[in-house]
Amino acid sequence: MPFLLTPLIVVFYSNSILGGEISQRENSDRESNFEKKRKRELLKMNLGFVVGVFGILILSHAAYSTIQYRGLLKIMEEEFSRPPMNVVLELIIGVALCLWAALTLPGKFLSIHPDSDENRAVSLPDNSEFMIFNHRGRLFPPQIDMKF
Amino acid sequence: MVTKTEERELNQLEIQVENGGGGAWEYLCLVRKLKLRRSEEVLKHGSSILNDPRKRSALGPDEWTLYEQVAIAAMDCQCLDVAQKCIKVLQKKFPGSKRVGRLEALLLESKGLWGEAEEAYSSLLEDNPLDQAIHKRRVAISKALGKPSIAIELLNKYLELFMADHDAWRELAELYLSLQMYKQAAFCYEELILSQPNVPLYHLAYADVLYTIGGIENLISARKYYAATIDLTGGKNTRALLGICLCASAIAQLSKGRNKEDKDATAAPELHSLAAAAVENEYKQKVPAKLQLISSVLRSLKI
């Protein structure tokens, strides 16, 4: 039982560390959408981690009870056709939890379509390594003072 | 390569930063990552961060990258004293560094002292003869002096050593185009398509060059590459759609004198009508005020 509590402790500890980090950043910048999205993603990842650990524990418990059942059948000299119904139910629940965790833990999936908005090239980078400085813009320098 | 989501993010950040919201540092990081040339904005917002000692110390080790970025932006906007100050700070922190030496030579270039800049680059090249950036700057110097043939020679020598540099191939193609040497420019674009066949913009540029060279085989190839661009972008590139319409009318014009079988082989009436319909659709969605113009142009192309 305390074995099951350790992932929960890990989750809450990591969340408190995360909260501390964000409060140390500059207060002058408004909390932009990027930071909100990142926090939401991390919470979801932590939940997925916990659920995944539960799923693996349930699966290992089902495996252990199946091994015990087979030992019992060997004593009673009967054939092993399939594990008892409650073990099968445990298996199904374990598989479902692990599946959900495996899909949530990696975070956002990337798109593979070449014409989706994330992959479609709209423009190429302006070759700044070959940039030349004698263009018309040099007649209109902006007024900037540097105080360092 | 700038993707659509990155472009949208960049525009949003730019509007946010220009109107006084936060996010200047994220904007500068995005510009640096996408390698864009937004010198005025970078100069304005970068110098506002650097002038504030509190914000400067909050950056940590990224402060020096920001100094470099602001120095280059200042050189592009011709604020040479700003650039000089940034370089001095970097020199104090990293004495004897090659990267800072490159920045100094760049400053000489922006002042217009081409001879001294060339000497500085040759001395830097003696220490490390395989520095890609320095070779490229020498090409840029010849380009700035208005000698594209020398620039092409230097760039060809550079590409013999570093054949995988896509930006250099693109630059060579543009230099050839400025001298109207279309076949050589087509060769450069072919190299680019071979190495990165999933970037639709190379197919588009190649098709443009083929269309410019003219002749019926080149026009048919150009139509194929415009079609490839449309395939890779999911039909969202208006220039490729218009390219197909123009190719269609040019092929129809050139194949007037031929016999019927040749004409049937080269014509692709469904492709043309589909492309014209797609162009009108895009105009209807994005710029309905100019729909009349494009409809009349497409009608005149059919004739």
Image (tube, rainbow, N blue to C red):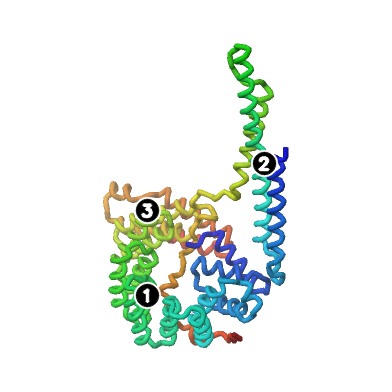
Instruction: Classify mark 1: helix, strand or loop.
Output: helix
Q: Residues within 10 Å of mark 3 (few under 14, many from 20)?
A: some
Q: On the picture, is A134 further left or further right than A148?
A: left
Viewer-proximal residue, B283 or B113? B113
Q: How far, Cα to Cα, is label 1 from label 3?
A: 38 Å
Q: How far, Cα to Cα, is label 2 from label 1?
A: 54 Å
- Quadrant hosting residue B17: bottom right
Task: Tell me if residue B48 comes above or below residue B32 in the rendering.
Answer: below
Task: Tell me if residue A68 comes above or below residue B278 in the rendering.
Answer: above
Q: Mark 3 highlights which residue?
A: B224
Viewer-proximal residue, A88 or B259? A88
Q: Mark 1 highlights which residue?
A: B134
Residue at image coords 54%, 57%:
B282
Instruction: Classify mark 2: helix, strand or loop.
Output: helix
Circle 1 or circle 3, nearest the eye? 1
Q: Mark 2 highlights which residue?
A: A51
Q: On the picture, is A114 further left or further right than A94?
A: left
- Quadrant of the snapshot with the N terminus of chain A: top right
Query: Quick one: label 1 or label 3, which is nearer the N terminus?
Result: 1
Q: Position of residue B262 (x, y in %)?
A: 28, 49
Residue at image coords 62%, 66%:
B12
